[in-house]
Amino acid sequence: MKRILRVSVLLILAAILTAGLLYAYGGNKVVKTSYETTSHPGKIHVKWDRKWGVFHYDIYRTDITGEIYTSDNVPFKKYDKIGSVSAFHASFDDEKVENGHYYTYVIKGYGKDKLLCDNFDKNVTQYECAGLAKPELLNGGYGENDENSPQCIYLYVQKDGGMDADGVELYRKAKGDKKFERVEPEIPEGGSAEAFDLHDTSVKPGTSYTYKARTFAEENGERIVSEYSESLQLAAVNFIGQYEVTKFKTEGDTLTLTVKSHKYNAGLKIDKGTRTVFATKNKKGKTVSYELTIDKDAVIAAGEKETLTFTCKKGDLPELDQPQGSLTVGDEGYGVEYDIEVFGWTELRVDLDKKKGTVFVDYDN
């Protein structure tokens, strides 16, 4: 009985060893391995999965700074061997890195005389930044949600790789200023080391600002800071422009409209020929729409009045003593520009019954 048990144990061990060797050698195929990285100031710790049958591991690296945002699939061009460790190790400290630079690694495991495993792919699929990564500064307030205002500009700072940040520094300069000055924004609770929401409530209404930001962290008593983000320009204005209708008239094929811009609006520009839709009810109470075009270029500055003239090319308009219905200028988002310094298609929407107009910017498109 004992002998049978011994033979069974030996067979099981032999099977495990054979499976392990087959796994390591993969027949004649190279087995894929994976790795993870941890960033520190001036150092990246690389750790990988240990494989059966490996005698030693070679570690390779390439610097892809400046390439990680140019394509989703950054190709490997050249990578250099930076170290080698025995099979008893499954990690390596790369201490010849530059803070703020991005690196990607290849780990190759060798048996006595052949390559057994690696994580090489023709395209970079994983990378790490040494120290703190250069943060990305974004507009945190969307025009269609009316978040940015004359009293507050919302900003969003996020990192891509590198160490976790302990905090963020925000700098700005008003239009016409030469130097950036540091400002102390409000930072709501519930943020993370990956990203920061910033509320700049110290803005002056109607003023345009340029911002930049950097993150900071402390490790082992050493304080490090990231590179500055790219700059971002935003204005402390009504992100949805507010307008008042002061005059309205239809005569023949012409509609004339005078609007007054709120003092904290941005500038509004409408191109000659911009498509406009005028919708109103006829005598039977049915809504009828007319396609118009504006007769000339128009620019409406903050706090100013402007008279706009539109022409209907397919017949006369109904004669109205009072403004009724609605007017949509730039019906498909073309020909209207509201200068809030973010990209998106724009429409001027006028509720004639209420004698109020708004400029809407679809920031997501």
Image (cartoon, rainbow, N blue to C red):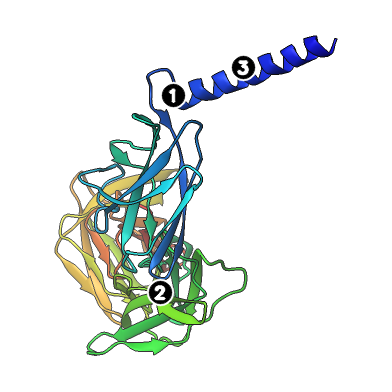
Q: Earlier in the sequence, mark 2 or mark 3?
A: 3
Disc 1: which residue: 25
Quarter holding residue 93? bottom left
Q: Amino acid at mark 1?
A: Tyr
Disc 3: which residue: 15
Q: Earlier in the sequence, mark 1 or mark 2?
A: 1
Query: How far across and down, in percent of the image, does residue 36 sit?
Result: 47, 49
Query: How far across and down, in percent of the image, does residue 95 sit?
Result: 37, 64
Q: Amino acid at mark 3?
A: Ala
State the residue in front, 277 or 362.
362
State the residue in front, 197 or 220.
220
Q: Label 1 to label 3, Cα distance in Å?
A: 15 Å
Residue at disc 3, secondary structure? helix
Disc 2: which residue: 238
Residue at disc 1, secondary structure? helix
Q: Amino acid at mark 2?
A: Asn
> Residue placed at 43% from the left, 71% from the top?
155
State yes or no: discs 1 and 3 in contact (Cβ < 8 Å). no
Which mark is in front, 1 or 2? 1
Residue at disc 2, secondary structure? loop
Mark 3 nearby-residue class (10 Å; few <14, some 14–19, many ≥20): few
Q: Earlier in the sequence, mark 1 or mark 3?
A: 3
Query: How far across and down, in percent of the image, does residue 300 sit?
Result: 25, 74
Instruction: Identify the image quadrant of the N terminus.
Output: top right
> Residue placed at 44% from the left, 45% from the top?
86
From where the camera sits, is residue 213 visible? yes
